[in-house]
Image (cartoon, rainbow, N blue to C red):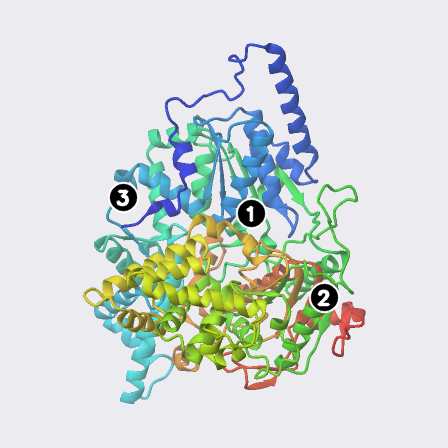
């Protein structure tokens, strides 16, 4: 059963289903006996309204002045998109006296962003002394699911018995689709096996079968189904598309067959995916009476991060934003869309495509309804110049293509009287620093030295190391934990600097591991290894001071139970001993099944972590039923940790708290993709090599029997060409070239996003020696730098530092 409250918050449910007692007119002051008091209240409210309007920058003020119709707002990084939207939403709610029967709908891309905007709107309405009941904020999927659940007969979604699935290429659902297709299409399958050339050698035949079953066809199914379904295309439409693009493999025909199997299995097994939520809502809104009912309840739709929408999502919000009395006129929309197509970084692995927001901007511009938010107060002047240079340089590089990677839109600093505190801050050092270290080990050394140098001057600063892939982050994290093995001269653990590994935190696999290490300690407290592991867990969780735990673990008995003749313990050591002894005491005072919950509280887990710990305890209790001993618990927990098969629980509160990534005095190791929407005082971009950015689509050697291309990327490029109304649909060779261009363009946008996260210092480097594969970072070889790094060195020669950083500078 799917618990859909994860997507639809309590606010959504209460506001879209108002109680009969809800007041319709929030401005009604007839209950006030004193008209003079009412007049004073109105003046104060108007003053608050004027204050909100005056706080808006150019571009933001277009949203604030909006009174209806379509409006596109194209923004730059750091321009305050969500801040401006929240202020504009509060102004619209106040001006139009919105209430539970007539509401403003605000949609955005993630639950974290939705929670952030919701809080800002509520704060504005609180300052206006208006009850926060005239709006609802949600993700597009959350809103769609809410509509679908209100009309299950029309949506076709039986949520009482349905299960949400998020398929991967190895998911049982995708595997089943592939096996069914192979069974029913032996001739097409044989064509794939033969590939470009084949000598009928039996061993090679079996190898190709394995590659097709486990890699090629699952990847094709996953990518094409998501791309087609989120665009509203059916399997039959894919077949007709394939007839227009003949090829020997019949790629689109294969994709259509896999899509058919997928949909059939979804229905049989009572499963739904995220695309099905949108489709279910659209099926509901096909009913004229119900559509009109929803449109009457929706005053307007404000969409944030509009560059990340898919065609079906666009269709859903346009229906809701239409005038209920004139559904035939799509131009009659109360719709404000805010986004930045230059920050579109999800289109290579999701169906999102910035072209749709660009088209909306062009249509609005023709009507004089386009606003530009090009002033940003986040970064210093040199970082802004570098980002603008990269945008122009990349567009010049791809000038022969019909669609440029970036929209030609420079970032501009804010005006001197801008209300943002510390807008366009002074740079630290040169503000932009470009390095070319000898190796990746030298890179880590330079980063750690620079962080310590800055931290000693500004301990309250926030730091981020942004990496292109998770394995690069793992390399840096290991260098932090094992400085001697990684030839690190500066150990950050010697300083009161917090390290936050976002990738590890996201997986939350640390919960079973931490529980195992603490339970092993309280089971055998005199083991030096178990004691040291437990102390490390307590230190990582900031429950005890960080120190040399080797000394404490060398003599566990003397540390835990010092005698009268033992030397006195320092305050830090005493704190460690007291906490360790309290854990050992719990071993004898609590039932075994309560130990995990106790340890989770002792580590001061966050809400989502506590929920995950309770889930873990329940699972272990079920698996050890009839033998609930600590030894049995440790055996089961060790199996879970070894297999890493434990799904944690997330809460909306946890997802909405971006501050965990940007805390003062913290170094956050995070991927460039996950860094979008965040910012730090000091940002480090290591390992900027051409192999990663822009990289290139590559064909694994085991798949080359099909040709010098991959089926999934060719199919997706062909589908997008069809959706974008290309005059001529591309053949395999042309589609592969288009796919490579889309990959390169997005990688450059990703680098642009990463650069614009920095406020005071942007540190960039490309080591001369780097691994070909980050699975084996020790195998280094010469690697070419990212072309952007080379161009920046030429454009900003004074910011290129050809030697190790001198801390005296």
Q: Residue at x 46, y 73 (%)?
A: 560
Q: Residue furthest front?
A: 564
Give SS at disc 3: loop
* Nearer the observer, 134 or 717: 134
Q: Which residue is mark 1?
A: 359
**239 horizontally vs 359: left or right:** left
Picture quarter with the C terminus: bottom right
Q: Position of residue 465 (x, y in %)?
A: 61, 67
Label 3 or label 2, whichever comes before in sequence order: 3
Where 30 falls versus 61 (above or below)? above
Give SS at disc 2: helix
Cα separation between marks 2 and 1:
49 Å
Q: Is residue 729 visible?
A: yes
Q: Is residue 166 visible?
A: no
Give SS at disc 1: helix
Q: Which residue is mark 2?
A: 456
Cα separation between marks 3 and 1:
32 Å
**Local crowd at mark 2 within 10 Å, few (<14), some, or many (≥20)?**
few
Cα separation between marks 3 and 2:
60 Å
Q: Residue at x 37, y 68 (%)?
A: 219
**Local crowd at mark 1 within 10 Å, few (<14), some, or many (≥20)?**
few
Q: Residue at x 63, y 56 (%)?
A: 679
Label 2 or label 1, whichever comes before in sequence order: 1
**46 horizontally vs 598: left or right:** right
* Nearer the observer, 676 or 36: 36
**Local crowd at mark 3 within 10 Å, few (<14), some, or many (≥20)?**
some
**220 horizontally vs 563: left or right:** left
* Nearer the observer, 644 or 455: 455
Q: Position of residue 217 (x, y in %)?
A: 34, 70
Q: Quadrant of residue 394?
A: bottom right
Where 112 falls versus 714 (above or below)? above
Q: Which residue is mark 3?
A: 156
């Amino acid at each position: 059963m799917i618990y859909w409250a994860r997507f639809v918050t309590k606010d959504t449910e209460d506001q879209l289903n108002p109680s009969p007692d809800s007041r319709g007119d929030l401005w009604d002051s007839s209950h006030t006996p004193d008209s003079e008091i009412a007049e004073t209240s109105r003046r104060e409210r108007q003053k608050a309204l004027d204050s909100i309007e005056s706080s808006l920058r150019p571009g933001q003020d277009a949203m604030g002045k909006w009174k209806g119709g379509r409006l596109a707002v194209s923004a730059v990084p750091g321009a305050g998109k969500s801040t401006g939207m929240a202020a504009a939403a509060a102004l619209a709610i106040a001006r139009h006296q919105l209430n539970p029967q007539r509401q403003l709908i605000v949609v955005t891309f993630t639950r974290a962003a939705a929670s952030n905007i919701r809080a800002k709107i509520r704060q504005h309405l609180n300052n206006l002394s208006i009850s926060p009941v005239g709006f609802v904020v949600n993700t597009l999927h959350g809103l769609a699911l809410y509509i679908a659940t209100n009309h299950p007969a029309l949506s076709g979604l039986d949520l009482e018995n349905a299960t949400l699935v998020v398929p991967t290429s190895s998911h049982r659902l995708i595997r089943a689709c592939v096996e069914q297709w192979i069974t029913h299409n032996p001739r097409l399958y044989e064509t794939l096996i033969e590939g470009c050339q084949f000598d009928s050698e039996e061993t090679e035949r079996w190898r190709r079968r394995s590659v097709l079953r486990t890699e090629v066809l699952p990847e094709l199914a996953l990518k094409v189904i998501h791309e087609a379904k989120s665009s509203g295309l059916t399997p039959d439409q894919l077949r007709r598309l394939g007839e227009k693009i003949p090829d020997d493999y019949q790629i689109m025909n294969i994709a259509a067959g896999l899509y058919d199997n997928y949909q059939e299995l979804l229905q049989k097994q009572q499963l739904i995916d995220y695309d099905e939520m949108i489709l279910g809502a659209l099926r509901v809104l096909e009913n004229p009476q119900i559509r009109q009912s929803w449109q009457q309840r929706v005053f307007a739709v404000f969409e944030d991060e509009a560059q990340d929408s898919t065609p079906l999502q666009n269709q859903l919000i346009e229906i809701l934003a239409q005038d209920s009395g004139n559904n035939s006129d799509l131009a009659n929309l109360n719709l404000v869309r805010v986004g930045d197509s230059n920050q579109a970084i999800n289109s290579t692995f999701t169906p999102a495509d910035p072209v749709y927001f660009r088209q909306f901007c062009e249509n609005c511009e023709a009507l004089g309804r386009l606003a530009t938010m090009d002033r940003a107060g986040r970064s210093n002047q040199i970082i802004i110049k570098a980002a603008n240079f990269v945008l122009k340089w990349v567009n010049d590089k791809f000038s022969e293509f019909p669609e440029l990677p970036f929209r030609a839109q420079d970032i501009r600093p804010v005006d001197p009287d801008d209300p943002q505190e510390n807008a366009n801050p002074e740079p630290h050092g040169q503000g932009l620093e470009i390095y070319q270290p000898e190796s990746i080990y030298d890179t880590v050394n330079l980063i750690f030295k620079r962080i310590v140098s800055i931290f000693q001057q500004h301990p309250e600063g926030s730091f981020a190391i942004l990496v292109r892939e998770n394995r690069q982050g793992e390399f840096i994290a290991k260098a932090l934990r094992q400085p001697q093995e990684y030839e690190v001269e500066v150990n950050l653990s010697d300083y009161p600097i917090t390290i936050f590994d976002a990738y590890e935190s996201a997986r939350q696999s640390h919960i079973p591991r931490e529980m195992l290490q603490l339970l092993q300690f309280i089971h055998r407290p005199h083991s030096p290894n178990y004691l040291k592991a437990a102390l490390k867990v307590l230190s990582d969780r900031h429950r005890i001071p960080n120190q040399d735990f080797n000394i404490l673990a060398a003599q566990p008995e003397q540390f835990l139970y010092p005698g009268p003749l033992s030397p006195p313990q320092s305050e830090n050591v005493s704190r460690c001993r007291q906490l360790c002894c309290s854990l050992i005491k719990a071993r004898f005072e609590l039932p075994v099944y309560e130990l995990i919950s106790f340890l989770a509280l002792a580590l001061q887990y966050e809400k989502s972590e506590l929920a995950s710990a309770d889930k873990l305890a329940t699972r272990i209790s079920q698996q050890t039923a009839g033998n609930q001993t600590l030894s049995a618990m440790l055996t089961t927990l060790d199996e879970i940790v070894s297999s890493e098969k434990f799904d944690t629980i997330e809460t909306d509160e946890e997802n909405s708290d971006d501050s965990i990534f940007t805390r003062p005095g913290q170094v956050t190791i995070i991927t460039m993709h996950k860094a979008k929407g965040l910012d730090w005082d000091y940002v480090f971009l290591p390992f900027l090599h051409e192999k990663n950015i822009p990289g290139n689509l590559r064909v694994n050697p085991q798949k080359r029997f099909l040709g010098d291309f991959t089926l999934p990327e060719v199919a997706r490029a062909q589908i997008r060409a069809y959706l974008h109304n290309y005059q001529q649909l591309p053949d395999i060779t042309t589609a592969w070239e288009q796919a490579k261009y889309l990959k390169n363009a997005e990688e450059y946008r990703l680098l642009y996003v990463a650069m614009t996260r920095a406020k005071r210092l942007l540190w960039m480097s490309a080591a001369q020696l780097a691994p070909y594969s980050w699975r084996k970072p020790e195998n280094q070889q010469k690697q070419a730098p990212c072309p952007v790094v080379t161009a920046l060195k030429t454009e900003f020669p004074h910011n290129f530092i050809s030697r190790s950083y001198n801390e005296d500078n």
